[in-house]
Amino acid sequence: MKKTEISKKLSSLKKELNDAQLVAVSKYSTVEDVVLAYECHHYDFGENRVQDLKEKTDFFFANNFKKVRWHFIGHLQTNKVRDLLKCQNLWAVHSIDSLRLLEEFLKRETDFLGNELKLFFQVNTSHETEKSGFESSEELLLAIKLLLSNPQSKYKLYGLMTMGTVRTDAFEEEARRCFKDLNRIARGLEEQLGLKFKLKLSMGMSQDYQIALAEGTDFVRIGSAIFK
């Protein structure tokens, strides 16, 4: 892709987002295209496979691109946690989808290279069996309490993440329902836990980010609208 093309797409998207943060999903893109986006002063990128993330983070680190903030947005197996934590400039993980995965992160904390890692807990608001995420409010609450019980940890509770329903004939209606549910869950947790900060929402992708914006998202994860 040409730098001017990426710049135009980024600029157009950011005008729509207002205060929401754009995570440019680079999972199907070459490192060269990601560099072009970085040169357009965009610094937040999302990857959903640890190996792909590692290759890109290594390249950026070797070339001294210090402003980059990497977001891991995919399903993560516990045996990949150690490799993920060794990625340079890892800023956030959007897909803490089980108590077991969180426990693995806590066990592997010494492997993390940075000073702070923001964690989003993934909630399966669509209730589709092929999707990961917390289904039980009790397990979600238990996981969050476990994280909060470690105040000296480098891991910080940052927010919740979800995806809209895929298997539906009412795509927009279902997306709106999923996003409303996540917002409601977040506000309920803030009250229940007495949090002094607002939980951020990570929801909305290329096909439904406008609905997510209307439902109050803080982060959108967009790839094809930028890199294709």
Image (cartoon, rainbow, N blue to C red):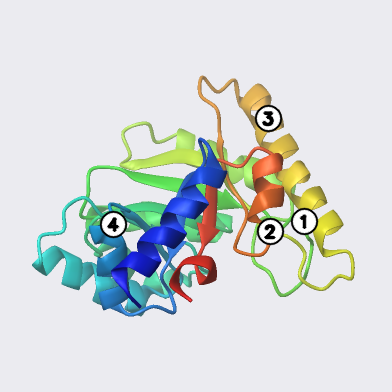
For badge 4, the amino acid type reads Cys
Measuring 26% from the left and 55% from the top, which residue is drawn there?
68
Q: Which residue is mark 4?
A: 40
The label number, if any, that marks residue 119 in the structure image: none
Label 3: which secondary element: helix
In the rendered image, which residue does mark 3 sit on? 187
The x and y percentages for residue 98 are 58, 58
Q: Quadrant of the N terminus?
A: bottom left
Pointer 2 or 4: first along the chain: 4
Q: Of the two numbered discs 4 and 1 on the same chain, state the one appearing first in sequence.
A: 4
Depth-wise, is mark 2 or mark 1 nearer the camera? 2
Q: Distance from label 4 to label 3 (Cα)?
A: 35 Å
**What is the residue that sits farthest to the right in this orientation?**
169
- Under mark 3, the amino acid is Arg
CA gap between label 2 and label 4 equals: 24 Å
**Would residue 215 appear left or right of 92 to someone viewing this image?**
right
Say what amino acid the circle numbered 1 marks.
Answer: Ala
Q: Characterize the local packing of mark 3: few (<14), some (14-19) or many (20 or more) Cα atoms within 10 angstroms.
A: few
| Residue 42 to residue 168: above or below | above
